[in-house]
Each structure stands twice: as structure tokens, then as C-alpha cells.
Image (tube, rainbow, N blue to C red):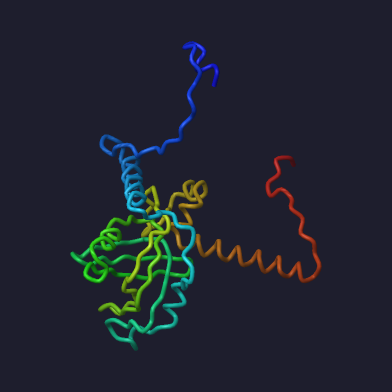
Amino acid sequence: CSSCSAGTGRSPGPLRARRISPRPARGLPVTLRRVSERLEKVERLREAGVDPYPRSYPDRAKIATILAAHDPDELGAGEHSQWSYRIAGRLIGKRGHGKTVFFDLRDLSGEMQAYARRDALGDEAFERIEDLDIGDMVGVEGGLYVTKRGQLALEVRECTLLAKSLRDPPDLFHGISDPETRYRHRELDLLANERTREIFLLRARLIAAIRGYMNEHDFIELETPTLQGLA
């Protein structure tokens, strides 16, 4: 602006857009350090030509549908590659065992385990899976597998990062118990508490059913303020 250059007598040069690099993690508080570390991962992916926020992941199945379609006791432990699926969900757990990584995905319908092997995927793809963080949105394609504990899982053939989470999620095992946090941060409440997700799904279905009934009987819906400051 002209006021910025009035004291120098020089006209300002053209504005140039620049990418803001993540700050060095050293010396930052824990929360900011974790955000900085995740931003660095995003930058590394972009430098490698990988989009950390792709726009779509089509032809995926609901986890509940897969779990309902197969009985692990009947299948028996081991690979069952004649069935192949694509799923997408939030990463809620990850465990590494040498050249194998096990991780848990959750979508709106349920939870399912996936496991990746270095020898099957190659070093680059396997290391990207190792680099995933809890809270990331991930897409997985692979064949059906039954673990030694009798659980259905997917043996990863392809793993796609769908959205990089830049902050650590709340405790996904115990959930959030503080009422003020739950009501002020509904996104965290929905992320951490299964009961809250069930209530919101029930509410959405109830409102849709009422709206459907009213539409069938020629009612007209009018938008009015939900909260009114005046009595």
C-alpha cells in the first residue's frame, strides 16, 4: 500500500506469493511440535509428487457390509484373496512388528484391521504406511484375511492417504468425559465417543423420517431461526 512506502519515497514492488514452510519442531511446545512434525510430513509428500488431500476415493465398501458378509470361523485363518475390497476410514490404531504393520480403520459403520508387509509392497510404499499418524484418513485396497485371533482384516495391496490430520486426536479408546469439551468441540466428541455418533446418526434419521412424512402430506417447510435472542 502507499502508506507502507511513503517514508522511503519508493513505490512498492509486485506482491509475490510464497509457500509458508513449517517451523522447526525443536524448542516448540509439545502440541505445536506435533503440528510442525505433521506439516513436515505433508511437505515431504508433496515434494514426492503425492497429494496429501486427494478429492475422491470411489468404489469403496462399508466396513459393516464386509463384516456381515463373512464368517471368520467358517473361512479359517489365513489369506482369502478371492474376496477383495476397498475401504476408507480414520486411522485409530497402529502397531509395527518389524517388516509388518497392523493398523485399524474406522468408518461410520464399523472398524476393521488391515496389515501391510514390506516384502509385498516394497520399501517406499511400506515406509509411507509407517509414516501415517493416528487421526489420518486412509483408503486401503486388499484381499480378505483372517488373523490368528479369528478377526477379519485386509491384506494391503494399496494404501492411499486421503487426508492428513495435523493435530493429535483425543483419546480414541476412553473417549472424552469432560462435558464442556464435548459441547464446545462437537467434532472431537464425535471423533472420540461412539455413543455420541450413535445419537447424531439417530437424530439425522429421525429428522429425515419426519421431513419425508411431512413432504408426502403436502406440508411446506419454512426456514426459521433455531435460536431467538428475543423472548
* Residue 25 in the image, given as x and y percentages of width and height: 28, 39
* Residue 31 in the image, given as x and y percentages of width and height: 34, 42
Q: Answer with the quarter of the image where residue 36 lies.
A: top left
Q: Residue furthest left?
A: 98
Determine whether, in the image, residue 141 is placed left or right of residue 98: right
* Residue 69 in the image, given as x and y percentages of width and height: 44, 82
| Count of numbered circles in the view | 0
Q: Could you say which is closer to the camera, residue 2 or residue 191? A: 2
Q: Could you say which is closer to the camera, residue 91 or residue 214? A: 91
| Residue at 38% over, 68% down | 140
Q: Could you say which is closer to the camera, residue 86 or residue 145? A: 86
| Residue at 42% over, 64% down | 89
Which quadrant would the N terminus be assigned to in this image?
Answer: top right
Which quadrant would the C terminus be assigned to in this image?
Answer: top right
117 above or below 41? below
122 above or below 26? below
Q: Answer with the quarter of the image where residue 213 lies.
A: bottom right
| Residue at 55% over, 18% down | 2
* Residue 206 in the image, given as x and y percentages of width and height: 64, 66
Q: Residue furthest bottom?
A: 74
Determine whether, in the image, residue 217 is placed left or right of residue 13: right
Determine whether, in the image, residue 34 is placed left or right of residue 3: left
| Residue at 43% over, 66% down | 88
Q: Could you say which is closer to the camera, residue 114 or residue 30? A: 114
